Amino acid sequence: MTEVENNGQIQSILLRHDRSRDSLIPLLQEVQGGLGYLSQQAVAAVARYLGVSENDVFGVATFYSQFRFNPPGRHCVKICQGTACHVRGSGLLVEAIGRNLHIVPGQTTADGKVSLESVMCLGSCALAPAVVVDDTVYGRITQKKLEKVLEGIE
């Protein structure tokens, strides 16, 4: 999307919300849902709309791990770090995939293909270690299985 298109989308989202600080988190969630991330332009627009500083908006957004400030990759890999998954080696999955893709959790590959996220729980403890690639859950996954899954995307 161009900056003008993004701005139009942000403005239409803003207008659906009250101009109160109570709207901040729902606004950020909806803006991120529309754009895929919170751009500097989006943070500034939300701040102006609510009459708060950009620092206030950024402070709230950085407090919650659900918000991202860089465009996501075309594919998202979420590796669970909950207790059951951690005990069964999910930390090794994060390290191995990070080495292979040359990124750490929270980053996207240089080609924009894959974003890597480390999450606290996927709610699939019986399948530990669990990984979600886009919207598909993979359970009892190993490094080799995950590499094959990643080879199969785009």
Image: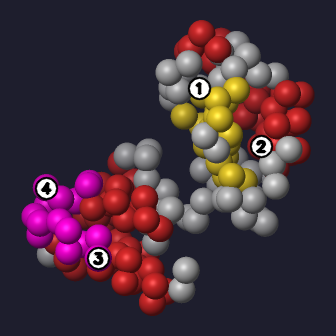
Quadrant showing the C terminus: bottom right
> Label 4 near label 3: C-beta < 8 Å?
no
Q: Nearer the viewer, residue 93 or 123?
A: 123
Real-space Cα distance between discs 1 and 3?
Answer: 36 Å
Of the 4 image quadrants, the one containing the N terminus is bottom right
Mark 2 to mark 4 CA distance (whole Å) = 37 Å
Pointer 1: what residue?
A: 81
State the SS at label 2: helix
Inter-mark Cα distance, 3 to 4: 18 Å
Identify residue for label 4: 22
For marks 2 and 4 on the same chain, the one whose residue lies earlier in the sequence: 4
Circle nearer the N terminus (1, 2): 1
Residue located at (70% from left, 26% from top) = 138
Residue 97 at x, y percent in the picture: 80, 39
**Label 2, residues with CA under 10 Å away: few <14, some 14-19, many ≥20:** some
Q: Quarter of the image holding residue 14?
A: bottom left
Total marks drawn? 4
- The residue positioned 20% from the left and 74% from the top of the image is 15
Residue density around tag 1, few if under 14, some if 14–19, many if 20 or more, within 10 Å: many
Q: Is residue 140 visible?
A: yes
Which residues are drawn in magenta?
12-26
Task: Please name the residue that numbered disc 3 is placed on.
Answer: 12
Label 3, residues with CA under 10 Å away: few <14, some 14-19, many ≥20: few
Amino acid carrying label 4: it is Asp
Mark 4–mark 1 CB contact (< 8 Å): no
Q: Nearer the viewer, residue 103 or 1?
A: 1
In this view, 12 is above or below 4:
above
Q: Is residue 117 a member of the stretch shown in magenta?
A: no
